[in-house]
Image (cartoon, coloured by chain):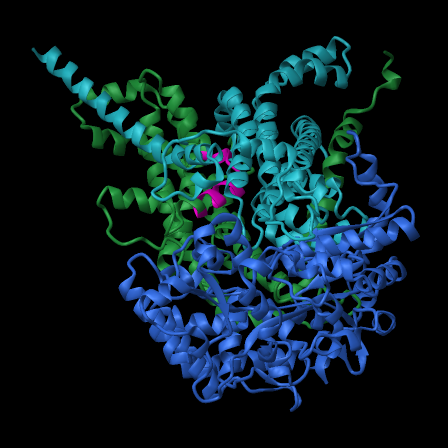
Amino acid sequence: MTVRVADIAGCVRRVIAYAVLAAVTFVICFPLVWSVTTSLKPKSEIFAYPPTLLPQEPTLENYRALLQGRATYFQGGTAAVTQAAPSDYFVAWFINSVLVSVGTTLITITVSTLAAYSLTRFQFRGQRFVPYFSLIGYMVPSIIFVFPMFLVMVDLNLTDSLWSLVFGYVCITLPFCMWLMWAFFRGIPVEIEEAALVDGASRLQVFRQIVLPVAFPGIIAAAIFSLIVSWNDYLFGRVFMNSLENMPLTVGVMHFFEGTHVDWGLMMASSVLMTVPMAILFMLLQRHLVAGFGAGAVKG
Amino acid sequence: MTPSFRLSDRQVGLLFMAPFIVTALVFMAYPVFEALRMAFFSYNPLRPDDIRFVGLRNFEFILNDRLFWDSFYQATIWTLVSIVFQTVLGVGLAMLLNQSLAGISIFRGLLLFPYIVPTVVIALNWRWIFNPEIGVVNYALKSAGLISENIYWLSTPDMAMASTILLNVWKYTPFVIICVLARLQTIPLELYDAAKVDGAGAWRRFLDITLPHLQEVLVVVVVFRTIWTFNKFEEIYLLTRGGPGTSTFNLAVYSFEQSTANLRLGVGAATGAVMMALLLLGSIVYIRVSGFGREEKAL
Amino acid sequence: MTKKEAGRWTGIGRRDFLAGTAALAAGSAAFPAPAIAQAQRVARVWGEPGPYAGVFVQGMNEWAQKNAPGLRFEVETIPWDGVYVKLMTDLAARRPPALISVEHPIAFQLMAEGLLEPVDDVAQRVNAASRMVDGLKLEHYGNWKGTQFIMPAHHQGHLLLVQTDVIQELGLGDPNSWSWNELANAAKTVSEKKPGMAGITLALGRNLCTDYHFAALLHQAGGMTYDAQNKFEVAFDSPATVEALEFVKRLYAYMPKGAVEYSFLQVVDQHVTGKTAMSFYWGRTMGRAAEEAPAVFAKMEAFNHAKHPTTGRRSTWTDLQGWCIPKANNPYVKEVKEALVYVQNSVEWGVKYCHSLMPNVAPVYKDVAAAADMPSHPFFKTKPKSVETYFTGYVPNISSTANELLRGANPLAGICHGRSMWAQVVQRVLIENVAPAEAAKWGAKQFEEIRRENIRLVL
């Protein structure tokens, strides 16, 4: 008897848990589902009221336009098609964003791994200030230094160059990644390394062959973080970049707002294409992310 | 390899440290230093040839500017409400996700998802679905009979504030979930079993076991989220641009507007300096409560 | 203290500090440099959102191909709300565009700051002064203390766009004959009798568009912000301002509730989707409606604004937009001037420019307006009356914040627009329920502050 009551109670509990989870998941996913369905609608249907839940005549036209361009304006009279539409640049923006995020991540990971290793394995003066410095750097919002940093870029002659974005993003990601790697290295016992050193291996060999493999999960977590930050940023892109062809995706797609005309189809299709790479990465590496973030906290 | 080719440990240590130090000095310490310095200058970006030292005038300006105080107040409201919702929802959902249910890992993946969605994407999205006239949210609420009049999500000061808070909660609750979940997974299940034997109910078990274990991570999360939320720029700027009126301005938006639209880089920088001071205060709180820098702690 | 001294003050000049680290930064390059270097010389040209600047730049490129091999002009579209970020970053970076077309209040600000190259020579070579259409003068486009700094590009005023079928059905009379009262009554009647449709839509958010819409009403009431003929004294705290604010408040009752966050886009959206019977707008609404909403387009007509009951004015905020050339750090001044002369002397390019977004950008030169090709655009057949109003009919009502009631150029307007001052005053009344008289006082105080802070620009 009691067993069955417990069973039923467990069953009810499970049903409630699933119901709550399903409801929350719906709320969380709805905006993105709505982008996907909107992006598949033809222009006439996008503005239809009442809105249609699923596209009545699904079309890939918006995606095609992102790859091949689409004129924005009504034309007539003597004026032929005149200038490149913003959508002509979408592919360039995408490539820019990929270059910048990958570049940022490579630099951040290299610099932070080396530094964190150094911090946990060697003694030198001023060492204990580094974590504090990281902590502050980790908390400082980019709005505070974006303009001075822009002026630095001016002096380095890097404005409107993807390098300026890479350096900008390294500033945001480095403190946290440094911190994360620091936590990781401290968790790795030094005995193995010492044994290897006694056996005649050099520091670099030890670093490469013993330390890096163990720290790999931490590196993955730091890399995902760095990719997310540099892929998603808007402020630095807005301030540093000028030419249409050099913009990152986040700033570029704002050009689909044309003052009196918003191409919501393009907007939503690009939202989807902007989210997909991160989503795939996230799905693949989610385990490491939770483990890695368990070690520190995450910036957001 | 002969020992003579080897760098000493100290040299390797400095070599490994060097890239970090250089990057930190050039691209982090220096711009922040410049930002603080700029706060004492009158600096019209259109006229880089005409930059004047003005002492504390920029600070006087902001302290006498009603909009600065409004922004301060609004930032406080937006931060407090966001944090309360994020923490409560985050802990609740993390506990839900910590159960052993079939397919739980799929839910875990989906619930953490907003964290990786670019702010630009979600802000545009929200402007689209929360459009009062043709947006799907009002339509759905109307069809469900929950409302009879369209809700103007971004048009009244209160609603706009609520909408930006909603966006912030939507996007960053996963952060709390990730941190809390990682901690929850380390609580020994035996503790709960023992408590059950002692006849403790679910609520008692939460108070006596779960909460004490979470205390530390929650303090960290709350301090961090408070600092970041207080200084957020993109979420507000992209969704409402601080409007309607200036009802969703926070200090970051205020600083940006002063620097760009008003062409007063110095005033923007002075605002930044104030934000920086508040942030240092927050950091001290954090260092105190978390025992940061003490060797035995992993955080 | 100058910048140099500032550097000494802290002990380190930014340049000195960075000189040593620049090499390091560049040296850490471990992945292939992205495409930023270009062999071809590219001169950037700023235009506002829309295709017309692009057409003009095409014309400039036609010149470049013949006369300046290796040089290419490239248009950069600057979103209305992004002008200041672009301006400040590009000028601070000492890499200004070669040529700018931007709303004239902002251009006037640059002009008074001394950032622009004089264009008297260009004006002479295109014979601009004598070619101007009736009612407009070359000076209106940007003349400061006797020197011309801006070459005319187009003029665009916002008008009262009306869905005539709705007005007829409700028997509201001829919008041409309306004064403020009839306009408000028409809006009221529509909002009462037509469910789901607003009577009228204006932009009322904290943005440029609201500045423009409100300024039109302010000028209709005979009010001004600054008095350009009296040392730019602030004239905002006046009965005319209060009246205009009260009128906005009255109209707001018949607008969509969301209007308090509307800018350019949302006003057009409302009209094109048939959710409002009337709106204030420039010519773009018509172009977009033609493409997206033929039914709305069919019944749409543009009228001069309803006249103010006592002053009789129908003023409208008009952008007298021109081309200006940044002076410093601009390696293309010579080429740009040549290309400007080439395109502005060509009637053909003038017509193409206007046709690229009908009827939004009206021709400034008589020969362009009268060109044989001009009426080949379909709008001359489908909407002759509206086109006529946008092109010439409204010209007597031209006014703007940077040239209030055409009493003289006022560069302070650019700064005020940067801060959306007028919009802020309007929002005080609509959102914070401040009494119009008090809001006018508050506004006057802000304008006074801007004047004090920037007096060097005007006196």
Q: Which of these two is toward me, B5 or B101?
A: B101
Percent position of residue C30, x then y: 79, 29
Which portion, as a residue range, is magenta? B114-127
Residue at x-position 63% and y-position 62%: B259
Majority SS type along the magenta span: helix
Going by the image, does B35 lie left or right of C436? right
Residue at image location 52% in from the left, 42% down from the top = B119
**B242 and C58: which is toward the camera:** C58
Q: Which chain is cyan?
A: A
Tell me the blue chain: C
Task: Please say whether residue B60 is visible from this viewpoint.
Answer: no
Vertical order, B91 against C115 (above or below): above
Q: Position of residue C262 (x, y in %)?
A: 46, 60
Assign the N terminus of chain B to one quadrant of the image. top right
Q: In green, which chain?
A: B
Could you tell whether A208 is left or right of B172 in the image? right
The image quadrant that residue B273 belongs to is bottom right
